[in-house]
């Protein structure tokens, strides 16, 4: 049941890939680019939620002093998706899709279909690859302008 609740900073959320129904997940696997450059692999994992690896926390990062109860505005750079207790911070721009225009304005709501655009890579969109890895998961990276179906995610609040 999808209740249209406002999503605020500090919310625990899941991101579900619209095309596959799989959850955006971090399983603790790292890419090793040298001793000072290790990054977590982010994947589309299972069709059922794994509360340890699939829950993300929305954190304000643009220095405007938002409180944890403030609504998350759309089209606003400075949102961090923090995977649980793992200290991975990255800035994202969140845009909501709607049927009449490419992107919508307002505030982020439970059940919204969104695109996530990475700030550090000139706003490339979060993208789930169609190719399955050996365990049935799909690698996620940033690619394209957000217009493809593989760039679309449904955001859901976690109680």
Image (cartoon, helix red, strand yellow):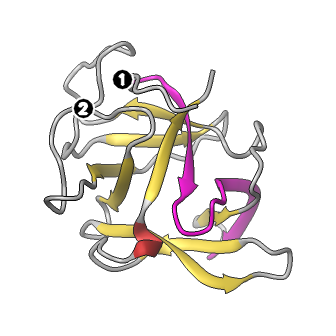
Q: Secondary structure at mark 1?
A: loop
User: Is 27 in the magenta?
Assistant: yes
First in sequence: mark 2 vs mark 1: 1
Residue shown at 39% from the left, 16% from the top: 68
Question: Residue 104 location in percent, x, y?
Answer: 17, 48
Q: Secondary structure at mark 2?
A: loop
Q: Quadrant of the N terminus?
A: top right
Judged left or right of residue 109, residue 156 is right
Residue shown at 36% from the left, 57% from the top: 116
Query: Hey, which residue is sitting farthest right in the picture?
Result: 135
Query: Hey, which residue is sitting farthest bottom in the picture?
Result: 131
Residue 25, compared with residue 54, is above or below; it is: below
Residue 136, compared with residue 110, is above or below; it is: below
Residue 1, compared with residue 68, is above or below; it is: below
Question: Residue 43 location in percent, x, y?
Answer: 65, 65
Q: Which residues are magenta?
A: 9-33
**What is the quadrant of residue 145 in the picture?**
bottom left
Q: Quadrant of the C terminus?
A: top right
Judged left or right of residue 79, residue 100 is left
User: Is 152 in the magenta?
Assistant: no
Residue shown at 36% from the left, 12% from the top: 69
Viewer-closest of 100 and 130: 100
Question: Residue 92 location in percent, x, y?
Answer: 34, 51
Q: Main secondary structure of the magenta part?
A: strand
Residue on which disc 2 sits: 107
Mark 1 surroundings: few (<14), some (14-19) or many (≥20) residues within 10 A: some
Residue on which disc 1 sits: 6
């Amino acid at each position: 049941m999808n209740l249209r609740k406002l999503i605020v900073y500090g919310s625990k959320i899941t991101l579900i890939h619209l095309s596959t129904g799989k959850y955006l997940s971090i399983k603790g696997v790292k890419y090793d680019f040298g001793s000072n450059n290790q990054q977590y692999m982010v994947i589309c994992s299972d069709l059922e939620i794994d509360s340890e690896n699939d829950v993300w926390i929305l954190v304000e990062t643009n220095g405007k002093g938002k409180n944890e109860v403030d609504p998350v505005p759309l089209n606003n750079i400075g949102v961090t998706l923090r995977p649980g207790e793992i200290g991975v911070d990255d800035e994202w721009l969140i845009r909501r899709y709607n049927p009449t225009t490419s992107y919508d304005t307002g505030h982020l709501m439970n059940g919204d279909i969104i695109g996530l655009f990475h700030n550090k890579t000139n706003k490339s969109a979060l993208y789930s690859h169609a190719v399955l890895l050996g365990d049935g998961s799909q690698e996620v990276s940033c690619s394209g302008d957000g217009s493809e179906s593989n760039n679309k995610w449904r955001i859901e609040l976690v109680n």
